[in-house]
Structures are given as C-alpha cells and as structure tokens.
Image: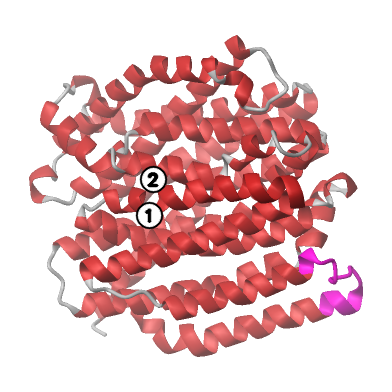
Amino acid sequence: MPFATFMRGRTRVNSVILYSLVNVLPKLTSGLLAVLYTRRFSTEEYGNYGIFAAVIYLLAAVIDCGFASAALRNFYADKNRSLAYLSSVIYTARVVTLALLPVVGAILYFFWDQLGVRFTQAWIFVPALLLIAYFGRAVDMLATICRAIERPGYFAAGQIAQALTMTLAGLVLVFVLRLGIGGALLAMLIGYGAALLTYEALLLNVFGIRRARFDWMTTKTSLAFGLPLVPDQIASWARMLALRPTLAHLVALSDVGLFSFASALAALPNLLSSAIDLALAPIYFRRRESSEPAEFHSKMLAFGTIYAASMMPIWMFAVLFCPEIVRLVAGTPYVGAAPICAVLLCATFARFQIPFLQRQIHFMRKTWLQSAITIPWSVAAILLTIVFAARYGILAAAWTTLATELGILVSTAWAIRRHEQVGYPMLTGLSFIAFLALLAAWIAMGHAQTNWPTILLKLAFVMLATALSLAIWIWPKRRLVLQLASS
C-alpha cells in the first residue's frame, strides 16, 4: 500500500475513532443516568420515566421531517456542495419544525390519559416534552452538518458539552435536590441546550445562518427525501418504545419500569456500533457518488462481516453477565429486569446491523422502502405484545421485540439485493443472533447462577468468541478497513 494512501487511511481511522468516542458520550451519559436513576426511583416511578422518554422520541420523530438525513445525503450532490445550501437547510428545518410544534402539542394533550403515566398535569409536562424534543432535533441537525463537512472537532465540542452538562444537571437535580422525574427531564433539556449553544457558536458565523432565507427548492428536495423516513422513525418508536405505554395497560406499572430499565441497559452496547456508523456514512456517500469501481460493493460486504464479528464478543459478554450487571448497578428491586435485558440485547444486536443496509437505501433515494418494511413489522410487534404480554408477562414483549428486529433485518437485506443486486452476509449475521438468543434463553430460564465457577465459565465463552472473531473474520481482512477509510 502506498505511504500516502496509508496515511490518508490512518487519518480516516483516527477520525472514525474520534467520532465514535464523542458520539458515545451524550448517549452514554443519558444511558448511565437512566441506570443511576434506579437508585432514586422506584420501579413504578421508573415506569413513568420510561414512558416520558418514549413520548419524547415520538415527538422528535414527528417534528423532524427527515431534514437531518436529507441534509447529509443531498450535500454530496455537486449542486449542493456549498455553505449556502447548508445555511438554507438549517433555516428551513427550524421553520418547519416550529410550525409543527403547536399541532403536535395539541394532539399530545388530547391523548394524555392514554399514555399510562400517573401524572395528570398535562399542562406542565406537554410544553416541557415539546421543548426537549425540539432542542434534541435542533442539536441533531447541527451535529449532522458537522459530520457532512467532516469537522470532527466541532462535532466533538457539542457532544462533550451535552454530556457534561446533562451529567452534572442530572446528579444535582435528581440526587441532591431530589426533584424526581421532573429533575431528570430538566437535566435532559439543559444538556440539549448546552449542545445547541455550542454548535451555534461554532457554526453560526461560518455558515451565516442568521442571513439565510426560506428556500422553497431546498424545502421541496429535503422533504422529498426526508418525509418518507418519518413513518420509518415512527415505526422504530412503535417496536422499541411504544411497548412501554402499551404495557402500561396490560401489566403493573412496576413491570413497565423493569422493562424500561432493561431497554436502557440493553441499548448501551449499541452506542459504539451506532457511532461507527455515523462516522462512516459520509465516507460511504462520497465514495458512491464518485463512481467507485464495482469492487467497492464486494468490499462493503466483506466489511459487513467484519462489523458483525467485531461486535459479537461485546454482546456476548453483556448477555452472559446480565444478572450480575443488573444487581450491581440497580440492586435487588430491579433484579427481575435481567432476563428481559438478556433478550433485548439480542434484539439490539440485530438492530445495529440494520443501518448498514439502510445507508444503501438512502443512496438509492428509495427511502419509501424503509417505511414499507418497518411499519408492518412494528404493527405486528404491538399486536403480538398485546396478545402475549397480558398472558405471559413482560418477557414475552422482549421476545416479540427480537422477532420484529429479525424480520426487519431480513426484509431490508432482501430489498437491497433486489433493487441493487448487493448481498449482505445474512448467514453470518443470523448465526450470531441465533447463538446470542440461546445464551439469552439460558439466562432467562434462571440457569446461570452467580457463583465463581459459573462466572469463570462465562468469561471462558467470551474469550473463546473473541479469539474466533479475530482469527476467522477480522485479522485476515485487517487491510480492508484502511482501504475503505482512505479517500
């Protein structure tokens, strides 16, 4: 490999590492705070907090209109490679989002009693949830712009500001001032506000956002790309977070708290993989737009195998040590969340592979495919949860989530193969998921006792999985990562 190409690849890898680390920070902070809140919230209070988190995600998905994804994808077209385009799309996104807030707020107020929370003060919580959702979307938009123009330093500054302020605010408001769920929500708002101010300070004068004007063509092209993604985002909410208010009508609110805590804990390993995907997306679009030779497809398929194999030992460790982790971080009141978390970890392993495929859908601009795939599966997840959770409890909802993620993964891979003739290493991915599901079933049945012989056996399994992943899938193709990363 020529030295210049090697150095460009090394620079790209360093950029990916930086993106990964700083992107993990705010999400890791939010996840760790959600775990720490178990020390202050009862399982019933945690059920309320989990439902509020689900509502915030839904509000953000509705008001987003897909502008951030559209900005990232459309920027790589030659006609949009300008600061004026970025300024216009940021301004347009804000105008459209603000216009949607009153409508969404009125709907939320009307359906407040159906959420399953034990708070009746809708006139206080509705504006608060809307504000958190708006700030979150605004931060995501500016962070996406930093990724598009490949300014990892700018991206890092906003993420670090959000992580630090959210952590400090959460600890003070919940643990010192004892403000409960209201304090947790306020900490979330403060974190988003700090990140937004940081991005504004770094980007506002550079891109001249204050001087931007509403551009109808920018709006039209952004909505044409982004709006078909909104049903997909809502479908993602339906299969991941809508189960919380659904379960509130089927089981005790304390059980909803266990499910919410298990969901938060199971999402933590996914932060690393999602961070890598965020960093690689601009590289992928640029390489595809530059008419790379046909072998780029085969490289991407090989990278898909490496990607899944490298994450396998992390998930295996998390699944096997669920009981010990839950008992350590949350204590005895939440020990019932361990089997749920083990199954949900299998679902997140399937979920982290999906963006790898959806990125190809974005390149083809066939964003309607995502909604066509995810909506039926998400509806099935809710219906199956209603049928089985009332009879078998919250563990049935976890297995339903895993089945749904598997269905979406297989359907998306099939759609990519049909529309672009690019295959995904499904056999490898499904084999990994099946193996994790067996381990999760072992944990769920209570056969994994917390004693030293069992712990040593678990560690041996993890070490063996790590060695096999390195020997079979990663080390033989170690040069491929640098080749894909170099420009």
Residue placed under numbered mark 1 in the picture: 373
Side of 62 relative to 471 (left or right): left
Question: Residue at the spot x=68%, y=51% of the render?
Answer: 388
For marks 1 and 2, the one nearer the N-term is 2
Give the extent of the magenta segment.
443-456
SS of the residue at dot 1? helix
| Residue ID at (15%, 61%) | 289
Q: Secondary structure at mark 2?
A: helix
Q: Residue furthest top?
A: 123
Q: Position of residue 219 (x, y in %)?
A: 18, 30
Residue ID for mark 2: 232
Q: Is residue 444 magenta?
A: yes
Rendering coords of residue 33 (x, y %): 68, 40
Position of residue 203 measured from the top left corner of the image (x, y, whole percent): 30, 33
Task: Report the side of 355 relative to 127 (left or right).
Answer: left
Query: Outermost residue, left direction?
Result: 79
Of residue 336 and residue 247, the one placed in the foreground of this image is 247
Q: Position of residue 297 (x, y in %)?
A: 25, 75
Q: Residues within 10 Å of mark 1 (few under 14, many from 20)?
A: some
Front: mark 1 or 2: 1
* Visible residue check, residue 487: no
Outermost residue toward the right in this view: 451
The one nearer the camera, 427 or 469, is 427
